Amino acid sequence: MNTHPASIGGVVHIGVDVCAKWLDIHGLKPGTVQRMANTKAGHSKLINSLPANAHVVLEASGGYEHALWLALLHADKAVSRINPARVRHFAKATMKLAKTDQIDAAVLSRFGQTLKPKADHLPADWEMELADLVSRREQLVAARAVQKTQLHQITHATLCKQATALIKTLGQQIRALEKLIAALLARPEASAKAKRLQQMQGIASVSAATLMAELPELGLLSDACISSLAGLAPHPHDSGPMRGERHIQGGRHKVRRVLYMASLRSVRLNPVLKAFFQRLVQRGKPFKVAITAVMRKLLCVLNKLIACPNFQLAH
């Protein structure tokens, strides 16, 4: 096992900046940055070079970090994948305004030392498979929407024919993915959670799959924490005697999109959420404010459904 001068005193935070071809690693040797290939061989070399009590800190890099993240988790190494915005704000707060791969690796190491992020856990195989299927379906739905829009704009006969054929092909692939998603949700390890989510009006199989893939923390956190994670918690903006408006910000936009569509349906069909929405509107709340409040309440109900097996919906 490799040793590190700082390992005697506690955790050694190793910052890794990831790009498509290589990894810049800060912390293996004090004050230095090493470069390794972003390949399976490079991942193995990094894992074998890690000191005892190492905690790797890397940021989400458009998927380039995913293979390394999984390799570290499979090797039972502590690793935290951080939102890049958090790291950039931290760099600015510490007056690190320059940006290179080596500097970013050092910033990630210092981020870990200062804020001590929690280590990620290895998702179950079915959770990773579900995330891939949901992500792919979303890509195809977006591509089909683009083709449908262009179909109304183009006049060339050949181009119209191509767009129509592509829309048909994308539709077939989307339906095939939905069958795979439905089959996965029927597995014993996923069916209980999926069925609980679908007890709520407005949450169909695809919506349940998206929530399970994009918000795996559902049922594990408090209502306040899960709302903030989804970007549905109203944050205050006060200073002295001034009381500013509360606004939501950040969070997971895919989750909010699912909850928005579910809320539009719920305020028509669910008597509890319908009454809640109408009360807000009668008090003069704008539509966006009222529907966002419904989204947050819906999320809290779903959180309780997963967290508390005995929780029953009001009808």
Image (cartoon, rainbow, N blue to C red):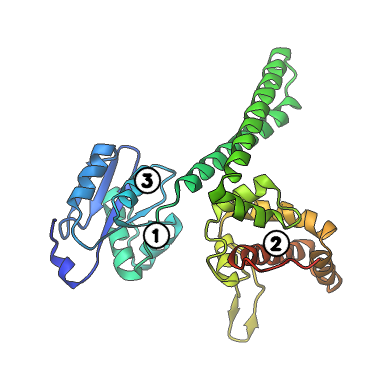
What residue is pinned by disc 2?
295
Q: Badge 1, how many Cα within 10 Å: few under 14, some, many 20+?
A: some
Q: What element carries label 1?
A: helix
Residue 41: % across, % down: 24, 38
What residue is pinned by disc 1?
87
Residue 21: % across, % down: 31, 37
Disc with the residue nearer the chain's start (2 vs 1) = 1
Does 21 sit above or below residue 193?
A: above
| Real-space Cα separation, disc 2 to disc 1, in angstroms | 29 Å
Disc with the residue nearer the chain's start (1 vs 3) = 3
Q: What element carries label 3?
A: loop
Give the residue drawn at x 72%, y 15%. 156
- Tally of numbered discs: 3
What residue is pinned by disc 3?
65
Give the residue drawn at x 69%, y 13%. 158
Does 119 sit above or below residue 206?
A: below
Which residue type does callout 2 highlight?
Met
Does 44 sit above or below residue 233?
A: above
Which residue type does callout 1 highlight?
Val
Q: Quadrant of residue 103?
A: bottom left
Left or right relative to 145: residue 63: left
Residue 40: % across, % down: 28, 38
Q: In which quarter of the image is the N terminus?
A: bottom left
- Residue 218 in view here: yes
Which residue type does callout 3 highlight?
Glu
Q: Quadrant of residue 287?
A: bottom right
| Real-space Cα separation, disc 3 to disc 2, in angstroms | 32 Å
Disc with the residue nearer the chain's start (3 vs 2) = 3
